């Protein structure tokens, strides 16, 4: 079976390397320090006996576990990202190991009174009796997505040590810059050469996802006219007040804090304004492609109607699609979801299939020709000091990878 202590040691060796990505950088990887982990991973893959280990000029790491069966089996891939979010510091991570978790408060930082409590984070109670890895309250943990990397590495090591488990060719891919939306951008799908893949980047044990939002961004520029306020009658046009009208014209309840499940939204995330000019920034989200198109049409219509009412172009609108729902690309090959589901069931894990209210690297990869559902990596409370991961979930995720490899070879044995 998977060696728990070795898995923990591997995970800690990854999270203690700072790999925070940088949205203000134009390079790939966006931060120099991501190379430190990328190079370590390439070296370890070689050391364990993987083949075709490569690291390209953008720090994408790939490797192959060759097939050990005589018949044709599709090539499958497993992908994780090694950067951590710029939303919270990932420097000097000091992981805390809590064995046999008792279901009570976990004091992360006694001095600052930072407590990880099941009163607030109820999910903790799912893991009573298990081994948890937490932060010391001053950094994020980086289980997102170094848990995924650990699981893929441990699964490959296990398969190499157990040739009696039959599998086809397996590709492994580790990417930079997922957290700033660029993990897939320079991913060489052709070189990867897999028929399909899975990102190991979900949260709670059992998560399996193949639907995500369709996404667009809208930049709205509102143009006013500045005149001395004492002499402004009939002359001043206050762009901030027009911006208010624009905001009010959008559906008031189709916003993040009022929606869940398959409900889409318009999210105003930035305003800056003066009398002369105001800028609004929105993201637009919907799982349904038609409703997504309707949302974009509505925002355009509001701009056009207001421009007409004012008799000039007071609103300038710039709309840009960001990513699409991978469901469109996964549905024609649903067996790839079915295999993952079956693997979980065989291991006694209850699959939690739900639509992601966001995007993943896999959604972009799916549109680049590599259908790519997302599987749990085990962590919770990503992107902050309360992040934690149960070791037992990481072991289960490792076993899911092994089982998917095995089932795929089995299914194509005819
Ligand atoms: Zn992630």
Image: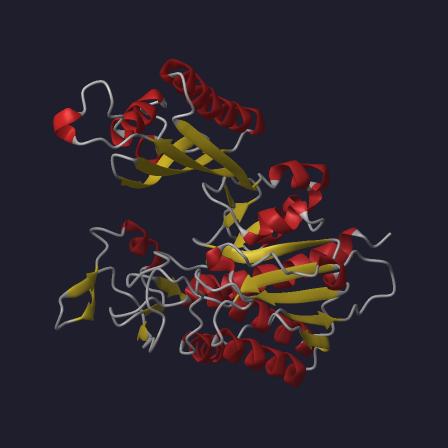
- In this rendering, the answer to whether 315 lies above or below 328 is above
On the image, the x and y values in percent for residue 409 come to 76, 58
- The foreground one among 80 and 223 is 223
Q: Residue at x 67, y 82 (%)?
A: 46
Tell me the colour scheme of the image. Answer: secondary structure
On the image, the x and y values in percent for residue 146 come to 48, 68
- The foreground one among 135 and 247 is 247
What quarter of the picture does the N terminus occupy? bottom right
On the image, the x and y values in percent for residue 357 come to 45, 41
On the image, the x and y values in percent for residue 391 come to 42, 67
Q: How many badges with numbers are in the image?
A: 0
Q: Residue at x 28, y 64 (%)?
A: 385
- Asked whether the viewer can see residue 214, the reply is no
In the picture as drawn, the residue positioned furthest to the top comes out as 309
38 relative to 127 in the view: left or right: right
- In this rendering, the answer to whether 215 lies above or below 292 is below
- The foreground one among 321 and 214 is 321
């Amino acid at each position: 079976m998977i060696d728990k202590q070795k898995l923990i040691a591997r995970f800690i060796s990854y999270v203690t390397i700072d790999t925070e990505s940088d949205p203000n950088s134009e390079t790939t990887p966006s931060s120099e320090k991501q190379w430190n982990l990328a190079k370590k991973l390439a070296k370890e893959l070689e050391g364990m006996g993987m083949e075709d280990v490569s690291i390209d000029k953008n720090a994408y790491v790939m490797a192959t576990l060759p097939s050990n069966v005589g018949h044709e089996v599709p090539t499958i891939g497993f992908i994780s990202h090694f950067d951590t979010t710029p939303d919270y510091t990932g420097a000097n991570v000091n992981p805390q190991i809590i064995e046999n978790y008792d279901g009570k408060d976990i004091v992360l930082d006694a001095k600052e009174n930072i407590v990880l409590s099941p009163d607030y984070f109820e999910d903790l109670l799912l893991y009573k009796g298990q081994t948890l890895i937490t932060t010391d309250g001053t950094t994020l943990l980086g289980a997102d997505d170094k848990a995924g990397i650990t699981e893929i590495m441990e699964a490959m090591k296990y398969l190499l040590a157990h040739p009696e488990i039959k599998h086809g060719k397996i590709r492994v891919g580790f990417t930079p810059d997922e957290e700033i939306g660029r993990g897939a951008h320079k991913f060489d799908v052709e070189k990867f050469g897999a028929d399909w893949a899975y990102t190991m980047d979900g949260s709670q044990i059992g998560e399996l996802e193949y639907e995500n939002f369709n996404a667009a961004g809208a930049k709205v520029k509102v143009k006013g006219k500045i005149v001395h306020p004492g002499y402004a009658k009939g002359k001043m046009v206050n762009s901030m007040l027009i911006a208010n009208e624009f905001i009010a014209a959008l559906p008031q309840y189709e916003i993040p804090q009022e929606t869940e499940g398959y409900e889409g939204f318009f999210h105003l995330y930035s305003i800056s304004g003066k009398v002369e000019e105001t800028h609004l920034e929105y993201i637009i989200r919907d799982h349904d492609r038609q409703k997504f198109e309707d949302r974009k049409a509505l925002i355009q219509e509001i701009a056009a109607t207001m421009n007409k009412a004012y008799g000039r172009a007071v609103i300038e609108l710039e709309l840009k699609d960001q990513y699409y729902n991978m469901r469109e690309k996964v549905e024609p090959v649903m067996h790839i979801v079915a295999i993952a589901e079956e693997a979980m069931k065989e291991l006694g894990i209850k699959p939690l299939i739900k639509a992601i209210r966001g995007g993943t690297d896999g959604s972009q990869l799916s549109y680049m020709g590599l259908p790519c559902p997302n599987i749990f990596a085990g962590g919770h409370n990503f992107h902050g000091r309360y992040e934690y991961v149960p070791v037992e979930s990481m072991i289960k995720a490792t076993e899911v990878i092994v089982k998917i490899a095995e089932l795929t070879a089995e299914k194509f044995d005819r």
